[in-house]
Image: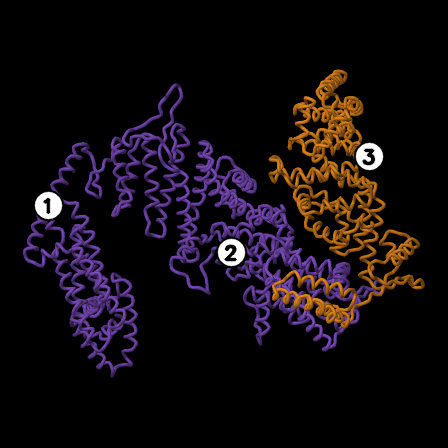
Chain colours: A purple, B orange
Amino acid sequence: MSFFAKLGSDDDSSSSSGSESEESILSGDEGLAQDQKLAEAKKSKNKASMFLRSDAEDSDEESSDEEDEEELTDSDDERAAKGNKFLMGADSTDEDEEEEDKTVVLSAKDKRFAEMEAAIHNITNAVRNSDWVLASSELDKVFRFIQRHQVTVVATTVSAAGHIPPRFLEILVSLEKDVNDTLTAEKSAKKKMAPGKAKALNGMKQTLKKKQKEFEAVLKIYLEDPAAYTSAYETANAAPAPKQSVKRAQAAQGDDEANEDFMTIGKGGKALNLTPEGVFKTLRDIFEQRGRKNTDRAETIKILSKLLEVSETTYQKLRVLLALVPARLDYSQNLAHIPHESWVQGRSELDQLITLLLQNEDYVVQETVGEYDDLVEREPTAVNGKKERVAVAGSLISLLESLDNEFTKTLQHTDAHEKGSDYIERLREETPLYTLIVKAQSLFERENLSDSSARAVMRRLEHVYAKPNIIIDHFESKVTDKRSADALIHDLCVHIYGSDAPVLRARAILFHIYNHATHGRYHQARDLLLMSHLQDTIQHADVTTQILYNRAIMQLGLAAFKLGYITECQTILADMFATQRQKELLAQSVQRFQQQLSPEQELIEKRRLLPFHMHMNVELLEAAYLTSCMLIEVPLLASVDTEEQRRRVTSKVFKRLLDLADRQAFMGPPENTRDHIIKASKALQAGEWEKARDLILSIKIWSLLDNVDEVKDILSKKIQEEGLRTYLFTYSSYYASLSLSHLSTTFSLPQQTVTSIISRMIYTDELPASLDQIDGVVIFHRIEQSEVQRLAQQLAEKTASLLDQNEKNLDLKLGSANQGQERDGQRTTGAGGQEGNRGNNTERRGGGNRGSYRGRGGRGRGGFNAGLGSTMGRRVAAQ
Amino acid sequence: MAEYDLTQKLIPHLDRHLAIPLLNHLSDIAIFPAEQLAKAQYDLVKGTNMVDYVEQLHEQAKTDETRDFTRLREKATARYQELQEKAQPVMKVIEDPDAVAKLRSGVDKDKNLDLLRSEYNIDIDQINALYHFGQYQYTLGDYARAANFLYHFLIFSPSLDLNISAHWGKLASNILSGEWEAALVEIKDLRDAIDNPHGTAMAKPLAQLQARTWLLHWSLFVFFNLGEGQGCQGLLDMFLSPAYLNTIQTSCPHLLRYLVAAAIISRRAPKPAGTRGNRDHVKELTKIVQMEEYQYSDPVTGFLKDLFVDFDLNQAQQRLSIAESVVRSDFFLSGFADEFVENARWLISEVFCRIHRRIDIGQLSKTLNLSNEEGEKWIVNLIRDSRMGVEAKIDLKENMLHITRPHATPTATLIETTRGLAFRSQAIQFAMQSTAGGETQRGERGERGERGERGGRGGRGGRPRGGAPGREEVAA
């Protein structure tokens, strides 16, 4: 299409000449021929019009510049005409639009007929052009129409003869003929049809056959005498029309008599009763309509809100509100979310409803109630001196939850970056929503609905757990019984712990952990996590809980970092970053490089995304993680000498980045956080701790931490220390001894610190050295291995590992663990002398593993160092 | 020292009677005001039936509260007599040697109960009376007899919950009457009962935690009175077992003090056969202390941290002197203060020697809080008792200590790595052969035989000789 459109637009002069396609193309050619001379001059103009064209394609209604106006409208016509000829797809939509313009006044039924006519027309055109793909799709449209038509027609009084329009049968017959012809022609044809087309053709043949069977009887009558059938159809259809209208009028009159003042005509032509007396009746009508196809939801809402205005008694109000709020929430099943205004109204109405219930203790909304008559006004009655409460059917908690869900949806579908003001405006509604939830909670508590109140508390928690205290205080300021933010979270969580829903409890624990972690209470958060044993069961939880778990873990890692627990931070965050999908695991974006997502999956994932204001700053997390890695890995890398040991380094992500930087011939000044850290690592490796410190401290993202200065202090101190360690590892082989005072000035650390760092390294056998207290120096005992010795050692190690592998394989092969244990036992007991060494080794290895697993299962809080890292991680990836 | 006193933290987990000695100890060392202590003692004892003692404390405390002690005494005596009467029939049976012999021959409780019912007309209520009487005697302060009654009750009673309770009672009675061996047995029984809860009451994690916390606290009395070797080792074994370590970390981190102290004290004590080295304890504890630092630290745990985390020897020395006074004033540890200090010094000097090559003796003595003379003696002892593979010599002229440490040569490490490779591969070979032959047992016997043959030989030499019998067996 665009090709032709472009052609057409090429000739400005001739475009007005005609709407016939051939002509226009002809003139286009002419124009081109002419243009060849003036090509240079015209090029720019062509381009301009091309751009305009694309505009026009986007929206036909768009107003254009004065100069191009004519041309535009003309070319539109042209396009339509051309499209008609060459491309049916585009044409059909155009035509529909046009037709709609003309026939606004047509009734729905007539409109449908017009649509069918158009489709049939398209089919004939398509058949002529042997565009079978289009024809087949249009045919489907027709069939769909017929089905719908049949359903509606059967309901009316039209006689059987008037059911199937003759146009339909006609196209059925002619199409079959065409299809068969083409198929036979195809067999003898030299050139094969395009596979897509052939497929469509065959499919059409099948459907036609099926449909013919369906309409066999009618078809037979029609084939006998088409003309007779047509006339019969027309007479059958003509008759009932006036009758219907009479009926309608009568109905209207009847209602008119009942209430003269005002009445609204509903969709089905029924009169609606908008008076206090008629509230129940109207409600019932609406209930009946609900869920049917073609119900105009907007209309329903309008009626209901009017009903609300007129309703007088509490009972009426309750009933109307209970219908109105779901109607609002139902409004848009096709849209991504309901419009904001509509949501706000829905919220205020639910608020009204709950306030009403809070004020009138005699009314109660329950999910299960005894039978009662819809149409009768009810009031609390006194039975035996006790007031009988009026129970109304409905589920407040589900209303509340779906309202809350809609709120999340609105936020999800508002782009926080591009439509920031919109986003904030919507977010502003969170406070009233929160107060609403609190109100609902107090209502549920009054009614002793423990399940509902637990769910409400959950919702409440969801709104506050990730927020800073100031915002929570703001939320709470609107609520009657105020509590401090920390106490609030604690109370709410404890409330959930007390309830008996395991899923809710797990979530509440995670909320609690997250909140502890955001407020820097690392130990509490960690203990809570370990004591809850969540990391053992989280793989079996639902995805949203897993996301929450991931968030809590990340926050925990950040909390550790803020307090300077570098190792802990690294172990906690490592697993998440090892996946390379941290954003996805935190439900902050849908990104997956390796595998293609099916649209449905993508939709599901998108639905899970968190609204923007809940996002965690992944860059900050990454900065924390990589910095921790740097502080841990750089000395470690310096301490190992063989390439093989290098490969054993734990953090793959960091290692990869470092290797990447190594390979670069030239490294520019650092641009992003990652660059900063990598450059700092390089500097640290070279012993330039000051440069490393400056680079790390100049990372801007730290400013997002609430205790920036403390963190920076901790970091620079750690960099000094690790710098010293790295220096010692890297350069110790070049010195026989180093004076402590020199070291302490170089790294500007107090001599005491230097001594204790070196002492630790010596004690743990990291550094082959010893201190000389009298001269204040450290003496290195490094024994240089000759190349042969080194290689021999390597070979020996490899052999040993090979042997280990062999033993393991053999154990597997021999089967049952039982046997393996037996063997182990034998070895340890039977092994004497030199063998004992190895036997112990294997035993410890096996025992260690088993022990740590058991420990995690049985203990309240397992060994943190091992437990935290290894368990946590694997679950993280489980998402 | 008052800020490091743990009494307040300990008492909530102790029985009323067990707390009495703690408070008495406090009044002995006088770190708290005497009036307050007297008041506290009175408040504590008030709830017991030891009327005479209460009266005495009442006078000391000088409270305004007036109580009629004669009436209380009468009431207590009346109740005592009542309970005694109830327990009489059972007591008679127990005192009868024939019955005891009969009962002893019966193995399980059900049979014994039947026997009692049929022959002596004693039903379950009467047995329970034994329990109540025992309990009452305990509240009166007659611990030895209480223990006796509860012992008999435990023999007969089938009720799980009451039994647990009786066990606790007996443990407390044993502790208070100073029967440590019996108390140790009681602790073992209780540990079994807590760790394998078949009763409903103990099966809940929270109840279990509570019970463990109690047991940990109560056992302090026993372990620290058993004597250095057995006691501390027992304490370490129990406290460091995973379940109890978790309990400490979760509900009573203050017990870390005792754990650390026990580990330090028992460092050089002769180890019972089959236990692991103490070094592990210290290392393990260092980790735990570091981990729990956020919720508990005192000079004793701080000492460990200074020494093994920060390697700040001066700081450790200072801390040790504070820790010493803490230990001296602690109810449980006061008897071990000297051992504690001695062993702590050992730790310091071990670390010192391990790290240093040349040490100024004067400085070391200072670090150890000893005079120069003493320091020298100390060092000589250290060298003589050298357990850390350190060869040290004193240079008196320079007044310093030379330490030479043998370093592994590359050749030695190479030998170390390749050691046993050949033998292990051979073992694999045999295992494979035996499975190929389908006779696992024989193969393994072959392996064992080969192993025995090998004995003290070098890895290589054992191969051809060891191989032969094994192969023969397979072939056969």
Image height of B141 relative to B281, above or below: above
Residue for point 39% across, 31% down: A364
Neighbour tally class for label 3: few under 14, some 14-19, many 20 plus, Cα within 10 Å: few
How many other residues sit within 10 Å of disc 2, few (<14), some (14-19) or many (≥20)? Answer: few
* Residue underneath mark 2: A878
Mark 2 secondary-structure assignment: loop
Residue at the image point whose x is 85% and y is 53% from the top:
B368
Three-letter code, disc 1: Pro
Inspect the image, locate mark 3, and give the three-letter code of the amino acid beneath it: Ala
The spot of residue A136 in percent (x, y) is: 22, 63
- Tell me which chain the residue with mark 1 is part of: A
Q: Which residue is pictured at 48% across the width and 37% down the height? A: A479
Which quadrant of the structure image shows residue A221?
bottom left
From the viewer's side, name the closer residue of A655 and A804: A804
Residue at which label 3 appears: B30
Label 1–label 2 contact, CB within 8 A: no
Mark nearest the camera among 2 and 3 is: 2
Q: CA distance from mark 1 to mark 2?
A: 65 Å
Same chain under badges 1 and 2? The reply is: yes
Camera-nearest label, 3 or 1: 1
- Residue labelled with disc 1: A240
Say which chain tag 3 marks.
Answer: B
* Secondary structure category for the residue under label 1: helix
Q: Position of residue A190 (x, y in %)?
A: 21, 78
Picture coordinates of residue A101, whole percent (x, y): 19, 57
